[in-house]
């Protein structure tokens, strides 16, 4: 098995096409993303997020005061607040989902007319919001959003943190003045951490999602290399496959040796690409380097397992199997936001199950969760899904390989 492993390492290193797609292509595309997006977010990062607040005496509500006091590192306001009624706020939220809503609603893009100079009298045409917050009532504070992108997640985290603190203070007040005083002190010490770190994440740049998708594409491109290698040892495809099939070597052992060789090369290429993107280009993935490496490792396993499975589908020719794999990888890349980051949110709203089983979406969601929420439940769900898909793809590939029968060799 070791001899087979070393042989295929050498064979992979001599394959110019595999080296190009596994290493050169991600570096080239990453460079293009860097030059295209590196300065965009810096110009927009300190512009306020637009929200609507509704409810009786909303201007005097404690949570309103919290939102009004939130600032960026440069001292500028984080929130652009409009006080209105629920019907108007809902219309403003609906309007924000049309067109390039995320950029316009969050950043007040130049593509949108300024509210003070617009000629129309309809406020929903000039004022768009990313979320509606209702204060007062039994629930205390409730949030309504129409999308689930980075800034909506930040807003959700702020609301969630406030509600937890409010519940804590309410319960402490029932225990007496001393308990309430201690609770106030705890909340006061913890609130800066909750807003700046636990909620907002390390990197708030929405364009970093393109780099998440780039790494995901690297992982999925490994499936193409796996398809090429495993098809090359099938008896109905090559003379090498005929000799292997007629020999006494264990097919599963042979496949595992090829798989390990592919995984070794892919991890080396991924490591070089990450070194180029993070230390050299300075891309901030917003998470711990070790966890980023773990995510890419599992992503590579999933990509290789997918290629292994497709290579054993029936007696189709290599071209037909390559077409199937291309549809899965490029189609999955499209709906995961590789070409337009808003598309993933659209799929999440219309058919969320697709994002749960699409390998590209799962990988990008793992990076996104690591940046925004850290190693929490959402990240764990993404990692377990990737592991589950890897196991399923590999086992199905083994079963399909065993079912293939040949009349003669």
Image (spheres, rainbow, N blue to C red):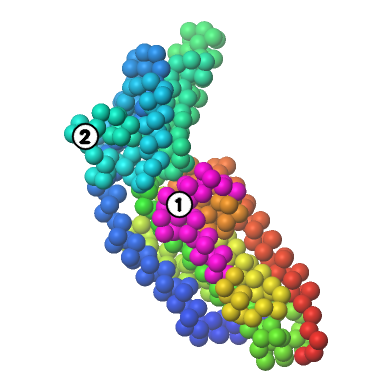
Left/right of residue 408 with respect to residue 328 in the rendered view = right
Q: Is residue 86 magenta?
A: no
Observer-nearest of 330 and 375: 330
Left/right of residue 62 with respect to residue 172 in the rendered view = left
Q: Badge 1 local density, few (<14 within 10 Å), some, or many (20+)?
A: some
Image position, residue 319 (x, y; %): 58, 79
At 67% from the left and 92% from the top, the residue drawn is 239
Q: Quadrant of residue 97?
A: top left
Q: What segment carries the magenta color?
A: 325-353
Up the image or down, 57 lies above or below 224; here it is above
Most frequent secondary structure within the magenta stretch: helix
Observer-nearest of 124 and 102: 124
At 49% from the left and 60% from the top, the residue drawn is 333
Image position, residue 323 (x, y; %): 57, 73
Q: Which residue is mark 1?
A: 343
At 79% from the left and 80% from the top, the residue drawn is 405
Q: Is residue 401 visible?
A: yes
């Amino acid at each position: 098995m070791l001899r087979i492993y070393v042989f295929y390492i050498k064979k992979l290193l001599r394959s110019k096409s595999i080296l190009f797609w596994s290493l050169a292509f991600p570096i080239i595309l990453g460079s293009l993303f860097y030059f295209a997006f590196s300065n965009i977010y810096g110009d927009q990062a300190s512009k306020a997020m637009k929200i609507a607040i509704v409810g009786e005496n909303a201007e005097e509500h404690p949570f309103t005061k919290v939102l009004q006091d939130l600032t960026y590192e440069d001292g500028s306001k984080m929130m652009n607040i409009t006080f209105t009624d629920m019907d108007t706020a809902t219309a403003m939220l609906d309007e924000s989902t049309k067109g390039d809503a995320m950029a316009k609603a969050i950043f007040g893009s130049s593509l949108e007319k300024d509210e003070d100079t617009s000629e129309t009298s309809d406020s929903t045409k000039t004022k768009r919001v990313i979320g509606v917050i209702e204060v007062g009532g039994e629930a205390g504070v409730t949030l309504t959003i129409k999308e689930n992108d980075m800034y909506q997640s930040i807003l959700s985290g702020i609301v969630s943190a406030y509600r937890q603190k409010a519940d804590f203070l309410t319960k402490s007040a029932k225990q007496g003045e001393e308990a309430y005083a201690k609770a106030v002190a705890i909340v006061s010490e913890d609130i800066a951490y909750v807003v700046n770190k636990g909620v907002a994440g390390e990197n708030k740049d929405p364009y970093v999602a393109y780099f998440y998708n780039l790494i995901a594409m690297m992982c999925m491109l490994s499936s193409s290399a796996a398809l090429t290698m495993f098809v090359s040892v099938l008896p109905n495809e090559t003379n090498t496959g005929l000799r292997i099939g007629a020999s006494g070597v264990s097919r599963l052992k042979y496949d595992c040796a090829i798989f390990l060789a592919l995984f070794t090369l892919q991890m080396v290429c991924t490591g070089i690409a990450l070194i180029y993107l993070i230390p050299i280009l300075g891309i901030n993935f917003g998470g711990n380097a070790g966890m980023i490496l773990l995510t890419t490792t599992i992503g590579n396993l999933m990509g290789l397992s997918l290629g292994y499975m497709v290579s054993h589908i029936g007696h189709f020719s290599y071209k037909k199997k390559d077409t199937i794999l291309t549809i899965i990888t490029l189609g999955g890349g499209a709906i995961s936001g590789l070409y337009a980051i808003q598309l993933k949110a659209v799929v999440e709203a219309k058919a969320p199950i697709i994002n749960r089983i699409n390998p590209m979406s799962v990988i990008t969601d793992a990076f996104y969760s690591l940046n925004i929420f850290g190693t929490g439940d959402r990240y764990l769900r993404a990692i377990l899904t990737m592991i589950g898909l890897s196991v399923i793809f590999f086992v199905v590939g083994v079963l399909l390989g065993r079912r293939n029968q040949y009349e003669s060799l």
